[in-house]
Amino acid sequence: MVTKVFIITHLFILCTFSLQAQTNELRQKIEQIITSKKAEVGVSIYGSIENNNILNINGDEHFPMQSVFKLHIALAVLHEVDKGKFSLNKKILIKKSDLLSNTWSPIREKYPNGNVVLHLSDILKYTVAQSDNNGCDILLRLIGGTKMVNNYMHEIGIKDVSIKSTEEQLHKDWEVQFSNWTTPKAATQLLLKFYRGKILSEKSFHFLWNVMVQTTTGAARIKGRLPEGTIVAHKTGTSDTNKEGITGAVNDIGIVTLPNGTHFVISVFVSNSKENETENDKIIADITKLAWDYFIKKMKLFS
């Protein structure tokens, strides 16, 4: 019995050292990517196998969210749905005046003259999966503005986040984007609360999960180097590039499904970047691929 206990304990110690070595190697590889780029990069990764944050790099720094905050808005809207204030079948009249012309808007492209009625569920899909800016502001007006969303985030325990500006405001001044910020760690914490069913009803969770899986923006980011068919529930955010050649934000946060059905959560924010669009996307893709390889090794270790 003593020998059996010794063997089990010894194997546990060896596994622990092996995991720590792999984690250190992952950090080093990610830091190599970051230090070679002309950009500020923040990373937070949480693994379901370890059941903790395995890695944070600049995890407490403030990064502009851009359209990542549409996930926060969707969660706030669905919270109101769960309370019975709204229904996903609620019909909303979208006027032509709601469809600003100088912004990304698949709704406007499909209904250029407005005066169309869409269900709340449709507007949520446009806003999250296709990152529609007009849809975003329509949702904000519905629920009472950015302050309501910001307060809701704080109420559910996500303190390191600031949501002050609408999409319309973001498009008027370069500096405004920095008023909507979060930290990589806070973004990961929000995804975890969502994934664990701590925020929404089961029905609302499945609705938003499916919408996030259908996200069409940022295909070259978290999903960029993952095996084809990998399920990723995510939300991207992207700013313009100013006349100095600086891109304010290229972001992607999401939940990645591993081959054995477990998940890992990853948040990557790239800010004040002097890299080109392809390279900014590649930073996120390369970091995610390193995380994927790390967790695949872990699966084999525990199988």
Image (cartoon, helix red, strand yellow):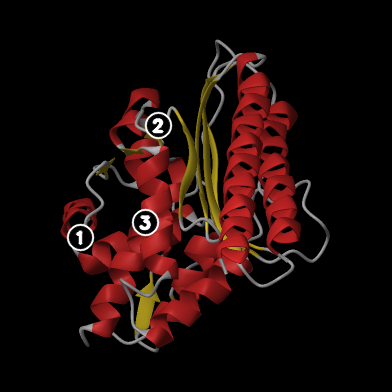
Amino acid of disc 3: Leu
Q: Say whether residue 296 is visible.
A: yes
What label does residue 94 carry, if any?
none
Secondary structure beneath dot 2 equals strand
User: What x and y, as percent, mark residue 272?
Assistant: 50, 20
Q: Nearer the viewer, residue 231 or 279?
A: 231
Q: Say whether residue 136 is visible.
A: no
User: What x and y, as percent, mark residue 13?
Assistant: 57, 47
Contact check, label 1 and label 2, Cβ < 8 Å: no
Secondary structure beneath dot 3 equals helix
Amino acid of disc 1: Tyr
Image-quadrant location for residue 80:
bottom left
Cα–Cα span, label 1 and label 3: 12 Å
The residue carrying pointer 1 sits among few (fewer than 14), some (14 to 19) or many (20 or more) residues within 10 Å by Cα, namely some
The residue carrying pointer 3 sits among few (fewer than 14), some (14 to 19) or many (20 or more) residues within 10 Å by Cα, namely many
Of circles 1 and 3, the one toward us is: 3
The quarter of the image holding the N terminus is bottom right
Q: Is residue 9 above or below residue 243?
A: below
Residue drawn at (42%, 87%), measured in percent from left and top?
A: 203
Cα–Cα span, label 2 and label 3: 15 Å
User: What x and y, as percent, mark residue 124?
Assistant: 45, 70
User: What x and y, as percent, mark residue 98?
Assistant: 38, 60
The residue carrying pointer 2 sits among few (fewer than 14), some (14 to 19) or many (20 or more) residues within 10 Å by Cα, namely many
Q: Nearer the viewer, residue 200 or 65?
A: 200
Amino acid of disc 2: Phe
What label does residue 152 carry, if any?
1
What residue did someone put label 3 on? 190
N-terminal of the two: label 2 or label 3? Answer: 2
The quarter of the image holding the C terminus is bottom right
N-terminal of the two: label 1 or label 2? Answer: 2
What residue did someone put label 2 on? 63
